[in-house]
Image (cartoon, grey):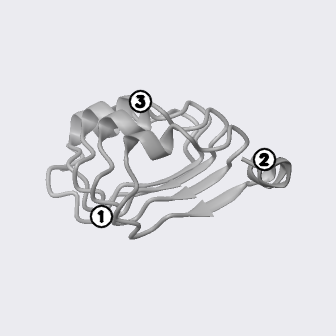
Amino acid sequence: MSHTHTICHAQLKKLDLSRCVNVTQESIGQLPQGLETLKLAFCQHIRDDALRKLPPGLRKLNCWGCGNITNAGVRALPAGLEELTLSFCKVDDEGIAQLPRGLKRIVIQYCFRVTLK
């Protein structure tokens, strides 16, 4: 990797990988530690294990349509997360109860297992 690429990569704050079919758990582990916003909408290969590899300073995460994310993935989310989209994911009421406490905004449309009882 060139020096210029390393500097740009290290300074990256927002990244949209929506609909990137080749994004995997391993890809997530390569994200810059300073990343604050990540969109993974409709990345079908993203599973719970990938969420364990998210940068610790992440503030906004969009997993709309990542149908392989379950309650186990929710438990792995970074504590400092402020905004989260989990629409069309396989979470239920148990997963919702385990969301990071500092969330200011959450979107859970079409999560048919969520009843909020």
From the top left corner, tell me how far across and down residue 82 is, in percent. Answer: 60, 46
Element at badge 2?
A: helix
First of labels 1, 3 by sequence position: 1
| Left or right relative to 4: residue 57 | left
- Residue 16 rendering spot, x and y as whole percentages: 56, 66
Image marks 2 and 1: residues in contact by CB distance under 8 Å:
no
Image quadrant for the C terminus?
top left
Residue 87 sits in quarter: bottom left
View extreme (left): residue: 113
CA–CA distance between discs 2 and 3? 27 Å
Q: Indicate the position of residue 18 as horizontal and vertical percent values.
A: 45, 68
- Residue 76 badge: 3
Q: Residue at x 52, y 33 (%)?
A: 101
The amino acid pointed to by label 3 is Ala
Residue placed most toward the observer, 59 or 32:
32
Q: Earlier in the sequence, mark 2 or mark 1?
A: 2
Q: What amino acid type is highlighted by mark number 2?
A: Thr
Residue 109 relative to residue 105: left or right:
left
- Determine the residue positioned at 14% across, 50% down: 113
Q: Is residue 72 depicted above or below 114 in this figure?
A: above
| N-terminal-most mark, 2 or 3 | 2
Q: Which mark is residue 88?
A: none
In front here: 22 or 41? 22
| Structural crowding at the residue carrying mark 2, measured as other residues with C-alpha within 10 Å and reported as few (<14), some (14–19) or many (≥20) | few
User: Mark 2 or mark 1: which is in front?
Assistant: 2
The residue under label 2 is 6
The numbered disc on residue 65 is: 1
Q: CA distance from mark 1 to mark 3?
A: 18 Å
Direction bottom: furthest residue: 19
- Residue at the (63%, 46%) spot, across then down: 59
